[in-house]
Image: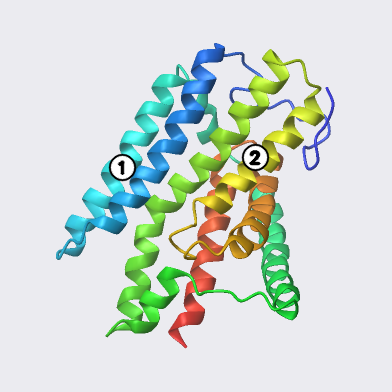
Amino acid sequence: MQRFLFERKNDKRDYPLLDTKLEQWRLWALLIFISVATVLWMEMTAALDFKVYWLEIICDDLIPITLMITVVMYLSKGKLGGLFGKPRFSDFIFGIVMVLIQFWYAQFSVTQLGKLGISFGKNASSTQIENAASKSTQYFQDLFSDIFELMGEELLSLVVFLAIAALLIQYYGLGRRLGLSIALLASMFLFGMIHFQAYNWNLAQMLIVIAGERFFLTAIFLRSKTIWPSYVCHMLFDAFAFAVSLY
């Protein structure tokens, strides 16, 4: 088997979808559903204004992620259950290293693009924290919402990555490395694009900074072959980024 990027040598663990064949129509259905469902979830969250925080958590976060996982599991005939497999401790160590590089990349790319005269907007959640009457309360509320929302972002990125790779390799005759490379770029692009609300359609920020950051999170998945390390590291990254808004 051709190893790809950060895969362990002689790793016997399988990638969900990629190493267990699924019907072509199911792969396309997964791609369409996860993409459309994510956009609808984001639009709904932006449109609805709940006055009670816990009602917002249930309707805006808990119900959507539950439905998303349920449909994804159904369409994949349970094969995506492998995403939630048990990680190794070393996967989290590797994840922390990747997150540190991700922080460096974010700062470097913003600085370099700024020198070219490209302006950047603040993340919508960061702005919300800065403008809140109680910044600390808003910060922890946003972090709690992230428990659900970032799971949705990880599902989107990894399901798109795996489904496209499986289609290209299993049904369209591409080699493993080429298929995974194209799938990685596609998932990075989509990850950047779904942040259109957070960054007010700033394409440079979405497609260079945010999409580039996705590379490091997916690298964690490539190493671990389970969603948990990339999910936890995504949480850590956002927790630190939002903490800056407290001061």
| Residue 59 falls left or right of residue 230 | left
Q: Say if residue 86 shows up in the picture.
A: no
Residue at left 55%, top 65%? 202
Task: Kindly give the residue lying farthest to the left in the view shown.
Answer: 51
**Label 1 Cα neighbours within 10 Å, binned few <14 / some 14-19 / many ≥20:** many
Residue at left 54%, top 28%? 82
Q: Which residue is mark 1?
A: 64
Marked residue nearer the N-terminal end (2 or 1): 1
Q: Quadrant of residue 34?
A: top left
The reply to whether callout 2 and callout 1 are in contact (CB within 8 Å) is no
Quadrant holding the N terminus: top right
Task: Give, as a three-letter code, the residue at label 1.
Answer: Pro
**Residue 35, placed above or below residue 60:** above
Q: Say if residue 126 shows up in the picture.
A: yes
Indicate the position of residue 77 as horizontal and vertical percent values.
Answer: 45, 16
Task: Give, as a three-letter code, the residue at label 2.
Answer: Ala
Indicate the position of residue 220 as horizontal and vertical percent values.
Answer: 67, 47
Q: Secondary structure at mark 2?
A: helix
Tell me the number on the disc at residue 186.
Answer: 2
The answer for how far apart the CA atoms under marks 2 and 1 are is: 24 Å
Residue at left 29%, top 47%? 62
Viewer-proximal residue among 190 and 82: 190
**Residue 164, placed above or below residue 111:** above
Task: Kindly give the residue lying farthest to the front in the view shown.
Answer: 117
Residue at left 83%, top 31%? 3
Tell me the number on the disc at residue 212.
Answer: none
Q: Quadrant of residue 18?
A: top right
Indicate the position of residue 179 as horizontal and vertical percent values.
Answer: 75, 28
| Residue 46 falls left or right of residue 189 | left
**Label 2 Cα neighbours within 10 Å, binned few <14 / some 14-19 / many ≥20:** some
